[in-house]
Image (tube, grey):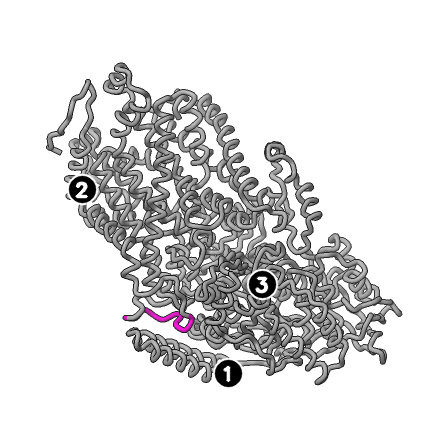
Amino acid sequence: MKKKLVSALLCTAMTAAVLSGCGGKSEPATDAAQTSADAAGAETTEAATAAAAENLTEFAQVPEDVDREQTLTFAQGADPRGLDPALVDDGESSKPIVQMYEGLTQFGDSNTEVEPCLAESWEISDDGLTYTFKLKQGVKFHDGTDFNAEAVKYNIDRQTINKTEDMLYADFVYGDVAECNVIDDYTVEIKLTKASTPFLNNLAMSLGAPMVSPTACEAAGNNLNEAPCGTGPYKFVRWDKNEAVVLERFDDYWGDKGVSKEIVFRTITDNSARVVALTNGEVDIIDGIDANVVDQITAAGCLLNKTEGMNINYLAYNTERITDPEVRKALSQAVNVPELVQSLYRGYASQATSILPSFMPGYSADVTQTEYNPEEAQKVLADKGVTELHMLAYTNPRPYNTATGQTLAEALQGYWSKVGITCTIDAYDWTTYKEKIGTGDYDVCLYGWIGDNGDPDNFLNLLDSEDIEINLAQYHDEEYSQMLAAAASLPNGDERNAAYGEMEQKIADENVWLPISHQENLAAYVSNVQNFIYHPTGNTYLSQTYKN
Amino acid sequence: MIKYIIKRLLLLIPVLFGVSLIVFFLMRVCAPDPAPIVLGQHATQESMDAWREANGLNDPVVVQYVDFMKGAFTGDLGTSYYTKAPVTQEIMSRFPATVELAIIAIILASVFGIIVGVISAVHKNSIFDNGGMLLSLVGVSVPIFWLGIMLIILFSGTLHWLPSTGRVDPALRPDTVTGFMIIDSIISGDTEALVDVLRHLVLPAVTLSLYSMAIIARMTRSSMLETLNQDYIRTARAKGVADGKVNRRHALRNAMLPVSTVIGLQLGSLLGGAVLTESVYSWPGIGNYTVQCIMKSDFPVVQGVVLLIAVIFVLMNLIVDVIYAFLDPRIKYSGKEA
Amino acid sequence: MGKKRRTEVVAGEVIEKPESQIRMMWDTLKKNKAALGGLVVIVLLVFLAIFGDLLAPYDPEYSDMAHTFVKPCSQYLFGTDQLGRDIFSRVLSGTKISLMVGLCAVAFSLIIGTILGSVAGYFGGRVDGFIMRCMDIMLSIPSILLAITLMAALGKGLDKAIIAIGIVSIPEYARIVRSSILSVKENDYVAAAKVIGNSDRRIIFRHILPNVVSSIVVRATLGISTAILDTAALGFLGMGVQPPMAEWGDMLGRARTYIFSAPYTLIFPGLAITLAVLAFNLFGDGLRDALDPKERV
């Protein structure tokens, strides 16, 4: 794949060189192409060595003699929004959250297959509408509260009948729940309004689904953002805003106890500073790695963890502002996505030909996106009299866009300027950016999504949300909603997959989004870190990870 | 003297009044409406109106200002729109970081600035003098943030000697008593933490100090040169007092007077430079935070911070003037022209 | 200085002819090698600002995504940035922006500062008290913080940067002009001019200001360097110009991510800022030595 890209790049550059030969400036093009190709080649080998180091598919047994007093430090690119799984929606919050909380079900170590967790077993009625869960006994929350059927009911009621507006994941996880009944102390019954194939997957999600302590939640005024309390292997110590979240091993944990005594999630917003912190040994693991720094990381003797990412990096057209699909199409035609992806992500992301990444069920290779065609774009835009665009972007790197939102924004601005569009960019740090999105004051904006549960519905229902922070295109289409609802209740299989293919094509035809890339999950760690897995959902479950 | 100080303190009132007026005007009248930014996604017209009403933004600007000043007099600067925490609390949790950085920086700047200045003056027109003055000229010319980045490249990225972000390794963080990491780590008796804190301080402090260091060096040099030309110095030399002693006992002591003023004034301006330095080193201080709050239109916090910095700045000037008066008995304060 | 001053006596007023002042200045300046060096660099910068676009090998705003992060080579002297733009062309283009913002901001604060300072110094009393208290208020907020706040209120853009940076240095000029006027005001020739019935405005502009020009010129030269630094700082914090405009500080702020993988994206814009600021500082220092040797710092 990488080789292909390199040669494709070479070809393009050479063609360019030949074409521009008559113009006289042929030399620089060839030269530069050579440089780029060399650079890409070097990265390929580096990446190969690094990737060869270790890529676990499941956690190994932790040796007896490991130091259980150690502190593991993970640095990420933004401060969490909060630590209440019901109230946040970002990956930075999710990483500390998965160490502290658990749901009824959980995912496999490195896949999205559903396994029992706080629920030992379950039965599903034939009509797919009633789920009966047998709960694990003897589980305690960090504050000493017992985990039981009442606690489950409290959690589910909290995000259904008692739902407040700021519960961003409530509808994803519990949207189909009709009611939740306590059968006995350790048995709960959940009734759905309609059959939902992804429901068990949803219950394993890191946001929305985790169980919080009812007592702690009541005490904290229904907001655990600053006082998290779950059943997970680690409990909350403190949160120094914009600096670090500190967690400590929960010694009464019901399962395999955490190895490290403490886990620290540090916030280092600057991409390069985070790499420096890693290579200087200030932190043990980092993510949000820009392709440009891979060499620096491997040169310092650190290891690179590279896995396929369940994500999408895209541009959303605000369909309430740019109502004409022809204009959206022309804007998409102006952008040379393959070139953009290669030069921004240097082979660590693949061009998105659909919303779903290729390894997910529902992915269809037949979806056709708008092709690069600047001449036609320029003509249409001139005809329609479109000359200006207002874009909102984020300044940080994101897991699905390691090159930072601002760089991507400026690259797009460059393409559009070539077809006569003046694009003004307003870029903000991630947290502010989310607030700004809420105002709806943009023509186009950049965003991305990290899959939560491995189900295609999790990606495609984004375009059906009433919430502007999730449905940034503000796409509200009756037909699409019906297609989505129908597909969600189909059993897994070809018919369901085909349904998602159709929906993808509808979105592509109407140019609601401009899909850009699927980023590989890149994490790097110092060489003595063992038992580290970067989950496809973008989370890292660190309780069995340690340094020797 | 007491009368003079009181007079100066009274003059502080109109200045602070004016500062609050400027900031209030800029943030409330010119800056974007915070309601949609704060309320975000679910902002309906009604909820925004309700929010503005609740935060008093529907009142006439004059009323808003009076309310704000009433609160400010009782130490209540309002609550942050975003974190919902009291502004005073938001500021105080970050302020020690900035003060610690500024104090270390001013110490560095004074010590090295005076050394360079004295050497340059004593060996006037020598290679030390020319070198030192060229260096100090570069010091005032180089952008502080670029210098910071270059230092990170060298000392963190290439040599791996020093950390480039944060105040302390979170795992070693001492319990917060004063908020000053150096003091806190000494109180907790944790040498490892103290060393770590100092290592984190080196690059930001050096970066922040360079500009002031250059100014102090130039001031010391010219003040020293002037003093060395005074009659009593010549007399001392004529009497056969050793050069070194003349320089130290007579010249330096008298030359320090204007230098001390500059140092005092620099401490105030360091707070401004801290904005950039903190941004480069992700230093969790007030400067970095203020920039973020300005971008988010978090009015109450910005007002609080700017007011606080102005108070410090004005007080510093006052203290410098008072110390100056003590040091130099020739100065008489009529209180008219300060 | 040994030179004989050419003076002219008209109705009891003594005015130094401007030419003689410039002449003397030049004589002193000629001996100061550092200041001359600064002047040479300034002339070069001005040349580049005017003709830079003609000299630039590429369009500074043209992004070529096929050629990103090319290391400095004969084709791209300073390399290319994250969007495949030629850094050399961008640095050249940045000269124009920095000089323009520097000059305009200084002109802005100079004009307003001079007017405020003259009024305060000449009329004294309450007017003086009021104006100078206002200046004190502005001086008690660190200038960069005030500039950032102003930018937040005004929004991004070159014109707004000029205003923001201009406003924050008004008090400096007002103070200088005021104190110079206070010292000149008591001179006999001013009193004489008053006696023979000259208007206040005429006295300020004709008799007083020409005598404080030298201090203002020195201050303004040094002020340009401060303005260039402030512009860069605003750009670095992402509050300066709208992309893709090539502004030195903005280039630095945007390239920060690549400090290790592509340090050349950072080194050249930073060097450009330092060089420009250094040149104005050297020249300004030299001017001060030449104009009023007493004010040496």
Q: Chain of mark 2?
A: C
- Type of the residue with mark 1: Ala
Label 2 sits on a secondary structure element that is helix
Of badges 2 and 1, the one in the foreground is 2
Looking at the image, is B179 positioned above or below residue A159? above
Q: Residue at x 19, y 23 (%)?
A: C14
User: Where does the image place residue C128, in percent across and percent down from the top left?
Assistant: 40, 24
First to last magenta residue range:
C65-74
> Mark 2 sits on what residue?
C29
Q: Residue at x 65, y 58 (%)?
A: A82
> Mark 3 sits on what residue?
A265
Q: Residue furthest right?
A: A183
Label 1 sits on a secondary structure element that is helix
User: Where does the image place residue C220, in percent across and percent down from the top left?
Assistant: 31, 40
Q: Residue furthest top?
A: C195
- Type of the residue with mark 3: Phe
Residue B92 visible, this angle: no
Can you tell which quarter of the image residue A324 is in? bottom right
Q: Residue at x 72, y 78 (%)?
A: A114
Give the spatial CA distance, label 3 vs label 2: 59 Å
Residue contact at pointers 2 and 1, CB within 8 angstroms: no
